[in-house]
Amino acid sequence: MRSSPISKVKKKAYNHGKPKAVKTFFLTAVALLIASLSFGQAIDSLESQLENDQLTEEQRLQILQLLSRELVFVDPVKSLSYTNTALSIATVNNDSLAMAKSYRILAAISRVKGSYYLAMRYHQRSQEIFEEKQDSIGIANSYISLGHIYRRLHRREEEIEYHKKSFDAFQKLRIPNRIGVTAHNLGESYYNAGQFQKARALTKYAIAINDSINNQLVLSSSYKVLGLIALAQSNLEEAEQNFQKVLQISNEQGKYSQKYAEAEALLGLAHLASKGGDLKKEIEYLEKVISFSKENELGDYLRTALENLTRLYTHSVDTELAESYLGVLKKVSDSLRNKALQDRFYLTSSVVEIHDLSEANKELEIENLLQTQRAAAWTTATIALTMLLVIILILLLKFRKVNRELLASKKLIRAQNNDLRALNQTKDKFFGIVAHDLKSPLITLLDYSGLLIHNFDQLKKEQIMEMNQHLKHSAENTIKLADNLIKWAQIQMEEAKCERKVFDADTVLSNMIKVYKETAEQKQIALTYEKTGDSILYADKDHLKFIIRNLLNNAIKFTSEGGTVSIKLLDKEPNLCSFIVQDSGVGMSQDKIDSLFKFGKATSTRGTAKEKGTGLGLMLIFEFLKLNEGQIEIESNPNIGTTISVSFLRS
């Protein structure tokens, strides 16, 4: 956990009565310094000035606030450190206007980090002080903060309203650098609202002003907006020129560049490559976004680039790369979630240490609780315990429902007793699965890990590899069982989503055949797919994938080496699309077929190569078919093979 950056400031003589001319001269000198140097040089110079022991407390405060404001979009963590130190000095010396400026910067940092509640609280504090002091510059800056908050909330009308107020206010005050900032903000707001003509005029105005005063950060953001406007209006050449201009400015500024503008420019160039059909260049730019976002902790852009790459490889039927990027995307999402929690905790802790507000203490407790989540070594055990609690809850809810029905009508007593018996069978089956199928691999994990811990030096490399393979298979089987139990529990709690739509099933089947081709070849099984009918149907695509995946897996599982497995798509009836999965495997008796779709009676059977199962796959297929108004038919003969037909409506 990061420690708070708030400095322990001792109260010094703070000359509130210092002549305004002296203060203005100092600020003017600092402004001239920034204008005469590049942004990075100006920041380095200001930071070096902080080491000067001859600075007055007021001058130190002014430099801290200037640094914190300029670094909000460049280095939010460093900006927060400077802001908290400035706020601590202002609080000790009871300088309300300086406190208001610090609160406004804290609002901007909170907004960048996605903590809109804190952003609005800080903004309200700063605006109250500015209005009380009748500080026109502070009020105008508050309008900027409000505009940005409403932008993040996608409330375009209010976003435009407050950015226009700030633009008009600074034009009246005739402050060039703030006019440049507010013109850029208002131009981007009009772009967000789709008012491209106004957006273009204001953004060009912002570019002219910021170029004249050497404000490179806002200049790069303005070129980014101009590029987005051109892209939206299909002016592709102009869009590319503006995005490249952003990258040029960022390259010149180095570590002090406007990171968000650079990331968006790279995404814009990837989009242009996509429009031009240049897949190689699109992938190249997306990979640059990923690298840049990782380096600068830009979570949203990292996630966007990963999602786009996953989409590209999925559409190109490169399932391995698609699955690889999906895995990376999940890890990144988890990492970003933890990072967001840390950032919000950091922001909240600043509120607590400065003001000791009860509301901030509550938020701190919440953030601490969230941060106590750890990646446990006992993941499998946690899944088992969670599933046990879920099923127990399901059973309790169903028992309560049965009891209410018993009290409501004596005529339903017999039916209710049957329901109770069915529930008891379900409960017994579930506990049997948990007791055996989940407990057994956990015991295996403990046994093998014990062997590795106590006999590592005596074991050969081959033995260790063999043990690791056993551990991996055991964990995979347990997770697969837990996943099926979750799906079954969702259906029982009526929480399973069924989003049916019309789509072409041919692509789904073709991809499935590719996925299971290697598995079939490992057992020397011939796996074929034949399409003889219309492949358009009306169903939930994820449910169809689950059904076909389980049918193919079972067919391969129960077919011996040298056998055959085939899947055919055909028209059995005018409004039905049917899939027939046929194998030359071990087959089933009629009694076995009758028990397949009953939770209390379904059992796991090992495959011809001793493959382990869960006993839940066909039962879940039956449940998903019911949700999709589908049909299933099974024909099987022992030692001859099995034929399973599933059908879906076309519309």
Image: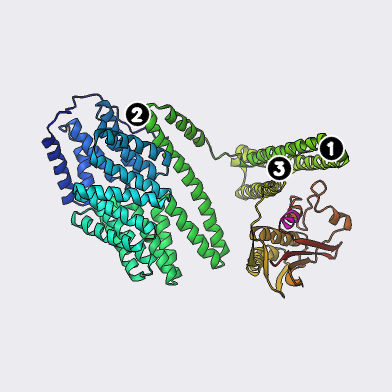
Comparing 286 with 492, the one in front is: 492
Label at residue 409? 1
Q: Is mark 2 on a helix, strand or loop?
A: helix
Label 1 with label 3: CB-CB less than 8 Å: no
Residue of label 3: 438
- Which is the main secondary structure of the residues drawn in magenta? helix
Residue of label 2: 354
For the residues labelled 1 and 3, the Cα–Cα distance comes to: 40 Å
- Span colored in magenta: 621-627
User: Residue 137: horizontal and vertical position, in percent?
Assistant: 23, 42
Comparing 143 with 31, the one in front is: 143
Dividing the picture into quadrants, the one containing residue 611 is bottom right
Q: What residue type is labelled 1?
A: Ser
Figure check: 480 above or below 414: below
- For the residues carrying marks 3 and 2, which lies nearer the camera in this image? 2
Dot 3 alpha-carbon crowd within 10 angstroms: few under 14, some 14 to 19, many 20 or more? many
Q: Which amino acid does label 3 sit on?
A: Leu
Residue at (43% x, 60% y) in the render: 287
Dot 1 alpha-carbon crowd within 10 angstroms: few under 14, some 14 to 19, many 20 or more? few
User: Residue 423: horizontal and vertical position, in percent?
Assistant: 80, 41
Label 2 with label 1: CB-CB less than 8 Å: no
